[in-house]
Image: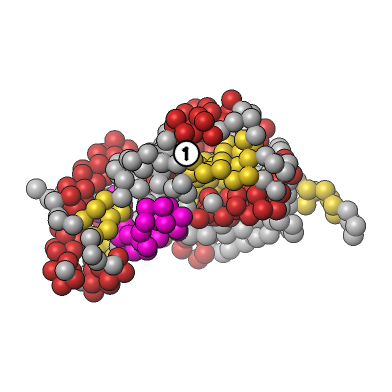
Amino acid sequence: MSLTSPWRADFPGILALAAEGQTYLDSAATAQKPQAVLDALLGYLASGVANVHRAQHLPGERATRAFEATRGKAAQWLNAAGNGEIIFTRGTTESLNLLAYGLEHLLQPGEQIVISELEHHANLLPWQQLAKRRGLELLVLPLDDTGSVDLQQAARLIGPRTRLLAVSQLSNVLGRWQPLNELLALARTQGAITVVDGAQGAVHGRHDMQALGCDFYVCSSHKLYGPDGVGLLYGRSAALARLQHWQFGGEMVLDADYHEARFLPAPLGFEAGTPAVSAVIALGAALDWLNGQDHAAVIQHEAALHAELLAGLQARDGVRLLGQPQLALASFCVDGVHNADLAHLLSEQGIAVRAGHHCAMPLMKGLGLSGAIRVSLGLYNNGEDLQRFFSALDNALELLR
């Protein structure tokens, strides 16, 4: 029996793509938006826009209230200790760059930054460049055969010189939850700063920041069924207090003279310039929409879809999965077939998947691959989407082999 999605009708984009004959299986890159998000965007833009925080007039006050309401919703979503622990950025990438510059003064030459082999470029390059600037050692934690960080190796590598650990919660290539509790405990034992890339993980489940115990957690609105151009940076109050300011301009100033200035603390001190007001307000609508769904039903539906995806891939000769994916996505390659050729033939049949290195080029090099196909699922996908994908995959492989 085909798996149906009770949420599909809430997503005009999915319905529009389906009407064009397109099957969207690229939600790990960016997700479609529910009608509630579109309504929030239009509602703000059509009712009179204004800048936030600095205006005393009614439109400005109204925009500020809606903007700050989203901060409260995000704090609740992540179970932060307070609204002041949420900073709005342009996305996960900007959040990680903010941290790499804001924490730079705390790291001394010869100390270590630790990441893992599976990191997205966004959680590799800022630390790589910081290591170059400060004369630091960048250590890379190896993976086991399943695609999880090898904890035995991690226990050996994380040591007295480790000053910062930055790891992904859920791999955007391998689709596995990483052993965060154990990794964070190892880092805390050394007094290291801990950063979690939740770009993928935030979409699948509610994550309690106070229970997780990391110093910083980052994620993006556009993967969380919200608009693009907005990210969330959670930081424990004590950790935020250690950050140095990295962008300068309007909004973040406490007092300024021609030769000296003082800056606001977090969160406003790290939100220089006019923010993406409409997108932040619409992110609040996305969080409201998500809060209104049956979370257990979403998990069950996504698990059933993922199981069907894995079963179909494993049943086809020559298809090799990368690691042992647990949810949300699966990356694979086919013996004797280039991933770009396969993606092209799938696209010609209306199947939207992603091909290439998935912004994890070092991981692909370690696997001996130039790239792979990734199929990623959203809660709006259904069994018919997978049937169309498998039919198109069989047609493409028949031509390519």
Residue lying at 13% horizontally and 51% vertically, measured from the top left: 315
Percent x, y for residue 57? 68, 57
Position of 93 with respect to 149 (left or right) is right
Residue 291 can be seen, yes or no: no
Asked which secondary structure carries label 1, the reply is helix
User: Compared to 163, does 57 lie above or below?
Assistant: below
Residue lying at 31% horizontally and 45% vertically, measured from the top left: 323
Position of 262 with respect to 309 (left or right) is right
Residue 256 can be seen, yes or no: yes
Residue lying at 78% horizontally and 52% vertically, measured from the top left: 253
**Residue 372 versus residue 82: which sits nearer the camera?**
372
What residue did someone put label 1 on? 77
Percent x, y for residue 135? 70, 48
Residue lying at 27% horizontally and 71% vertically, measured from the top left: 341
In the picture, which quadrant includes the C terminus? bottom left
Extent of the magenta region: 354-382
**Residue 167 versus residue 257: which sits nearer the camera?**
167
Percent x, y for residue 394? 14, 64
Q: Residue furthest left?
A: 1
Question: Is residue 360 highlighted in magenta?
Answer: yes
Question: Is residue 221 highlighted in magenta?
Answer: no
**Residue 219 versus residue 4: which sits nearer the camera?**
219
Percent x, y for residue 51? 64, 60
